[in-house]
Amino acid sequence: MSDHGNPHAPVHDPHAPLPGGGGLVAFATRRRVTIAMITVTMLLFGLIALRSLKVNLLPDLSYPTLTVRTE
């Protein structure tokens, strides 16, 4: 059933505020530049942290040894 020709059908306004404020998704779609700047800032902080991170892939292992000498 279509309300295309019905003059009493509710009209959807795409610019109308969402009920309940819209939340995080509505904020992210309204403030795209803000979200992009936050993302770039977090990426830069992550790269700085990655450069200063010390990681040993093969750490030095010292196995306990026992030497037996006979004379």
Image (cartoon, rainbow, N blue to C red):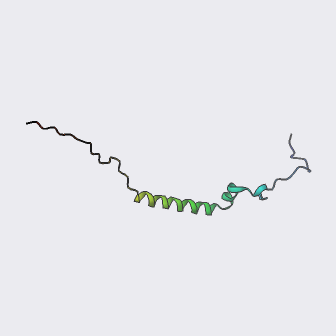
**Quadrant (top left/top right/bottom left/bottom right) for the C terminus:** top left
Residue drawn at x 82%, y 53% as measured from the top left:
12
Q: Is residue 18 visible?
A: no
> Which residue occupies 32% across, 46% down?
58
- Describe residue 67's horizontal placement relative to residue 13 as left or right: left
Count of numbered marks? 0
9 and 22: which is toward the camera: 22
Q: Quadrant of residue 51?
A: bottom left
Residue at horizontal 86 percent and vertical 46 percent from the top: 4
* Outermost residue toward the left in this view: 71
Q: Residue furthest front?
A: 71
Quarter placement of the N terminus: top right
- Answer whether residue 30 is visible to the viewer in this image: yes
The image position of residue 57, as x and y in percent, is 35, 48
Closer to us: 62 or 71: 71
Q: Position of residue 21 (x, y in %)?
A: 75, 58
Between 24 and 67, the residue placed more toward the observer is 67
The residue under the point 77% across, 56% down is 20
Q: Does 56 sit above or below residue 32?
A: above
Q: Give left or right: position of 40 versus 17.
A: left
Where is residue 62 shown, x and y percent of the image? 27, 45
Instruction: Identify which residue, 68 or 27, lies in the foreground.
Output: 68
Q: Give the x, y percent position of residue 3.
A: 87, 45
| Quadrant position of residue 13 | bottom right
